[in-house]
Image (cartoon, coloured by chain):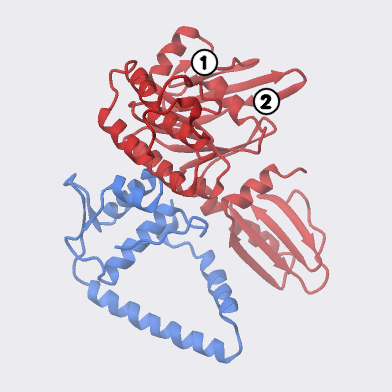
Chain colours: A blue, B red
């Protein structure tokens, strides 16, 4: 999968990795049995400390989304219910789209809308962003 | 002395005449992590590193590197077996060719990795037959890096390793730092390149005028440092300079900007008592943290 990390985004890099893997599983970009690169390989590819990847992988293992036992790689564990999750995300995306269109119609710029979303989300520390 | 630390100093001080280059520095560098050492020119980074490596002796205070006390000559020799370093004035034997230099270094270390040597040699495109003194600054840095990385050190200390390197070479250097760290090597490096530090470091120490000013993890900066901008209907009300949890306060017209080091939520709660018309919270990146820390006050 393709990761996009932002060092200055205000979230630890490891939690960005966790979130992106979660999202990829939820949207079926990653499926049961897929293999993610080893810690060294992914750290070099993303130019981050290997500890960042190790921490992300161990959190994903803890959440039951990754199997690290084999030693040879990180196996994705994605069981049922994920399809419905993908549909939920699609439905939510549509709601956001309607909301954004409404705000555009009221004359708000993209930047203003982005700021409103950011302000709403910033203090809503989701479980992923906790240590 | 703490076993979990690769480097520990206790009020380490270096005085040059009237100038305290390093002032009561108490540094803690955990094992198996990448720690960046930031500071302006002349802040005391190189002097600190030279004291750690016993190239310079401290005026007072002490320190341990891999559990070996830095002021003891015999412990020093032991320490150097497990520490590889690349420092500013690299004491390489300039009359030798690159090839002779590598062969010379290889003879000292039983655990020299020939495979790594040839891989780095190829990657860095070092001219084997050229004399070391005829190498460009970037090439000399690459040679020093090869000599440091071809060993299997426990600790890698780099003083401004990316200085004089072109962008492609910097990328290669960072890859090698990550590669070493993946094998469990502790890395301590000083740098001016904030963007590279922000990506690869686990921790950052900022030194200014010889004092340690910041010692934290990059995760903590991302999670906790916030810029909080308050806007008001009229002129911004006066604000106590000792606002709890706030490192810096700037007032301009109808706005107040706060830099929160921790618990931004609590700061926002307190700030709401001032009845601002809007509160905006944005993350703070390492560049801002660095500039705010070393700015002349």
The image quarter in which residue A63 lies:
bottom left
Residue annotated with mark 2 = B23
The image shows residue B142, relative to residue B290, as above or below, that is above
Let me know if marks 2 and 1 both belong to one chain: yes
The image shows residue A54, relative to residue A127, as above or below, that is above
Question: Is B16 or B33 nearer to us in this picture?
Answer: B16
Looking at the image, which residue is at 40% across and 13% down?
B78
Lower position in the chain sequence, tag 2 or tag 1:
2
Residue projecting furthest to the top: B74
Residue B70, numbered circle: 1
Neighbor class of circle 1 (other Cα within 10 Å; few <14, some 14-19, many 20+) is: many
- Report if residue B244 is visible in the image: no
Pointer 2 with pointer 1, Cβ within 8 A: no
The spot of residue B18 in percent (x, y) is 77, 20
Q: How many marks do you count on the picture?
A: 2
User: In terms of secondary structure, where does tag 1 sit?
Assistant: loop
User: In terms of secondary structure, where does tag 2 sit?
Assistant: strand
The image shows residue B165, relative to residue A4, as above or below, that is above
Between the residue at mark 2 and the residue at mark 1, the CA separation in whole angstroms equals 17 Å
Image position of B135 (left or right of A22): right
- Report if residue B102 is visible in the image: yes
Residue at mark 1: chain = B
The spot of residue B49 in percent (x, y) is 55, 26
Question: Is B155 or B205 nearer to us in this picture?
Answer: B155
The spot of residue B210 in percent (x, y) is 67, 30
Image position of A34 (left or right of A53): left
Image position of A21 (left or right of B186): left
Looking at the image, which residue is at 34% across and 36% down?
B120
Question: Is B220 or B188 nearer to us in this picture?
Answer: B188
Residue at mark 2: chain = B
Neighbor class of circle 2 (other Cα within 10 Å; few <14, some 14-19, many 20+) is: many
């Amino acid at each position: 999968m393709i990761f996009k990390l932002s060092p200055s985004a205000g979230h630890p890099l490891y939690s960005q990795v966790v979130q992106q893997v979660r999202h990829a599983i939820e949207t079926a970009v990653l499926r049961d049995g897929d293999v993610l690169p080893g810690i060294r390989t992914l750290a070099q590819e993303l130019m981050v400390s290997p500890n960042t990847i190790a921490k992300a992988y161990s959190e994903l293992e803890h959440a039951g989304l990754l199997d690290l036992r084999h030693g040879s790689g990180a196996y994705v564990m994605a069981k049922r219910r994920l399809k419905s999750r993908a549909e939920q995300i699609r439905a939510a995306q549509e709601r956001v789209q309607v909301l954004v269109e409404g705000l555009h119609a009221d004359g708000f710029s993209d930047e203003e809308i982005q700021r409103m979303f950011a302000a709403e989300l910033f203090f809503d520390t989701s479980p992923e962003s906790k240590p | 002395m703490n076993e979990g630390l690769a480097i520990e100093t206790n009020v380490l001080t270096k005085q040059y005449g009237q100038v305290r280059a390093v002032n009561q520095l108490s540094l803690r560098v955990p094992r198996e992590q990448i720690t960046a050492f930031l500071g302006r020119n002349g802040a005391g980074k190189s002097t600190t590193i030279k004291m750690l490596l016993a190239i310079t002796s401290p005026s007072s205070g002490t320190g341990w590197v891999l559990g070996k006390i830095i002021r003891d000559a015999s412990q020093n020799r032991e320490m150097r077996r497990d520490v590889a370093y690349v420092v500013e004035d690299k004491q390489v034997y300039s009359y030798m060719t690159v090839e002779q230099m590598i062969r010379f270094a290889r003879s000292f270390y039983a655990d020299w990795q020939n495979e790594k040597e040839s891989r780095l040699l190829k990657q860095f495109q070092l001219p084997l037959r050229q004399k070391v003194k005829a190498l460009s600054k970037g090439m000399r840095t690459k040679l020093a890096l090869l000599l440091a990385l071809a060993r299997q050190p426990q600790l890698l200390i780099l003083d401004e390793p990316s200085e004089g390197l072109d962008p492609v070479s910097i990328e290669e250097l960072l890859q090698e730092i990550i590669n070493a760290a993946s094998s469990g090597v502790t890395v301590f490096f000083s740098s001016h390149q904030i963007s590279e530090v922000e990506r690869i470091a686990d921790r950052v120490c900022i030194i200014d005028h010889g004092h340690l000013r910041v010692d934290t993890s990059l995760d903590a900066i991302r999670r906790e440092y916030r810029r909080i901008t308050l806007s008001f209907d009229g002129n911004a009300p006066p604000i106590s300079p000792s606002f709890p949890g706030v490192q810096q306060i700037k007032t301009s017209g109808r706005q107040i900007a706060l830099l929160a080091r921790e618990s931004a939520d609590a700061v926002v709660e307190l700030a709401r008592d001032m009845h601002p018309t809007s509160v905006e919270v944005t993350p703070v990146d390492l560049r801002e943290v660095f500039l705010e820390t070393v700015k002349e006050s």
